[in-house]
Amino acid sequence: DVVMTQSPLSLPVTLGQPASISCRSSQSLVYSGGNTYLNWFLQRPGQSPRRLIYMVSKRDSGVPDRFSGSGSGTDFTLKISRVEAEDVGIYYCMQATHWPRTFGQGTRVEIK
Amino acid sequence: EVQILESGGDLVQPGGSLRLSCAASGFTFNTYEMSWVRQAPGKGLEWVSTISGSSDKTYYADSVKGRFTISRDNSRNTLYLQMNSLRAEDTALYYCAKGSACDYWGQGTVVTVSS
């Protein structure tokens, strides 16, 4: 199975400041067709997860442009350009290239 | 608007069975894979199973293989998860999600396995 490793696991941030979360996979996430299926989700307290980013860097509909995804191969990053209060929650990366699908452990983002 | 609603969660004894349902609307159901993802209390997300749009392909996590069966009824826009031989470690909030990349999620249904 592909192991997804996130860091840090806890991220205290100041409102208005940038934040960055890393996600590394134990195998390349490049699919045979050339696409890379790496997704990012946010689970706000008491809510269901919501997908923010798919295929490494594509933002889902309605996701603010302060969220951006980047990376390739086995090394990926989610960046928030200026953290807002509504960004608090747990962020998960998930690979959708290989079976079984696997998630990272989650990164808890909180306001300092 | 995409809507996903899970049901069927309950308290069940170890070794028992349960069937979860997921009613979907707002998209062409039979053209999308559908998935189940679970979250044990206080824990992270764990992918459980995915089924293709035409039901010809199914995928399972090793932790549930041989015990759980995913299926769908495209005439009813409904996804199912039949869970047999339930164990305490299957206790979780079970989410239904659209696609194998999980672009939309329901609110979940709670399964508790305990004597």
Image (cartoon, rainbow, N blue to C red):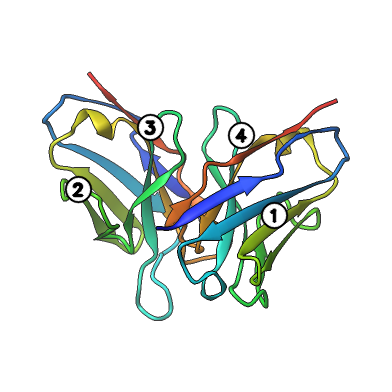
Q: Residue at x 28, y 57 (%)?
A: A61
Q: Amino acid at mark 4?
A: Ala
The mark nearer the N terminus, 4 or 1, is 4
Q: Chain of mark 3?
A: A
Give me the disc on residue B40. 4
Q: Amino acid at mark 2?
A: Pro
Image location (x, y in percent) of residue B1: 40, 58
Residue B83 falls left or right of residue A32:
right
Q: Chain of mark 1?
A: B
Foreground mark, 4 or 3, reads: 4
- Alpha carbon of mark 4 to alpha carbon of mark 1: how far? 16 Å
Q: Which residue is the extreme one toward the top?
A: A112
Residue B101 falls left or right of residue B76:
left
Placement of A112 over or under A32, stated as above or below: above
Q: Amino acid at mark 3?
A: Leu
Q: Which residue is mark 3?
A: A9
Q: Which residue is mark 1?
A: B62
Image location (x, y in percent) of residue A106: 42, 38
